[in-house]
Image (cartoon, rainbow, N blue to C red):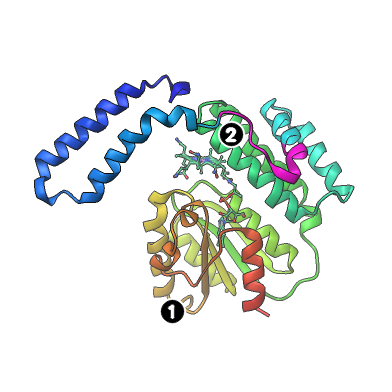
Amino acid sequence: MKSYNIDQSDITSKIKITLDVLKKTYKQALHPDIEKYLNLALEILPTLDAYTIYEKVDFGKYNNICAKILGALLNLDKNKASEIALDNLHQNKFTIKELYMKIFSPILYELGRLSHLNKITVAQEHYCAAHIQWIMTRLYPEIFGGKKNGLKFIGVCVEGELHEIGIRMICDFLEIEGWDTYFLGSNIPIKDFINTIEKINPDLIGISCTMTFNIEYTKCLITSIRNEYQCKNISIAVGGYAFNLTDDLWKYVGADIFESDADKFCNAIKERFK
Ligand code: B12
């Protein structure tokens, strides 16, 4: 709050007013949880700044390399970031999968945290995310062209969803595992997606959803796919930040498979498609 110049007393009084208005408007009909959570917020607010972690995170075993890559990216130095990542990869310090899971993903989550705390600019956040993707592209010669297993996968984000790095990682992992993958990226209209499914006839589809407001679109997309005669038997997997927040949300949208990250997903589908 401090970094946004928001005064705590301002939020406290707004919550109190909200509670008051809700009580007066809905009287007995007000769900007890609403009052419970608003009171909880009032209780927690004064202690919040003590909680808030402003210091740098610890990336564990990969702390040194993560800090170097993140530092280079925040300094808008894509070449240095790429050199650190690729040199260490080629010296076998880690695999491509580790680079994605243990270095790029935590850096991206950290970017979200820093941007949420208003500690970095929007420009820095965009630059860092864009150039992590640039480094991923530089890895394509090593990811593509391996021995194929005859299975096909299409990876997509629903219409309105712009977070595509997660599903891109999923596609790259499967490509490494021998799948033939079709990464369609962000914001794909339902009609176009169904056309592509009909053309490719994949064994598995992966839909990624980060923003909770896109959960209903995901459900709608899955229903539309199931309603198409040619597509109705294709297995559908979902994942992404929004699904990681709530247990069993994947069941609500009608998916067949859910896993919380690329590693777990690869292992789970190895079992299903052996
Ligand atoms: C980069 C980024 C962006 C970029 C995305 C660029 C791109 N080309 O993808 C841009 C700038 C576009 C962006 C925009 C926005 N963003 Co943003 N963004 C991020 C950030 C920093 C990183 C996202 C990321 O790539 N993570 C790394 C990947 C690897 O993680 P992942 O997606 O979870 O994927 C893993 C798993 O979930 C899983 N998975 C993913 N997909 C699938 C699919 C299947 C089938 C399976 C099985 C598994 C699976 O496997 C992946 C690898 O293990 C996050 C921070 C965060 N905590 O994630 C915020 C974040 C997601 N963004 C956020 C917000 C608020 C926004 C905006 C609303 C900002 C704004 N005011 O405009 C917009 C919304 C745009 C939209 N409509 O979609 C919030 C969301 C908060 C919330 N609870 O909803 C976050 C959490 C930041 C924050 N702390 O506030 N963002």
Q: Is residue 55 magenta?
A: yes
Q: Looking at the picture, tell me which residue is in the foreground, 32 or 195.
A: 32
Q: Which residues are magenta?
A: 54-66
Mark 1 to mark 2 CA distance (whole Å): 40 Å
Where's residue 260, x and y in %? 56, 59
Residue denoted by label 2 = 126
Mark 1 nearby-residue class (10 Å; few <14, some 14–19, many ≥20): few
Where's residue 235, x and y in %? 53, 74
Residue 248 as seen in the image, left or right of residue 107: left
Numbered disc 1: secondary structure = loop
What residue lies at 62% left-to-right and 78% top-to-bottom?
Answer: 272
Amino acid under disc 2: His
Where's residue 116, x and y in %? 50, 33
Query: Based on the displayed image, in which of its 4 quarters is residue 182 positioned?
Result: bottom right
Residue denoted by label 1 = 229
Assess mark 2: CB under 8 A from ligand 1?
A: yes
What residue lies at 42% left-to-right and 62% top-to-bottom?
Answer: 249
Amino acid under disc 1: Tyr
Residue 65 as seen in the image, left or right of residue 266: right
Q: Is residue 269 magenta?
A: no
Residue 36 as seen in the image, left or right of residue 62: left
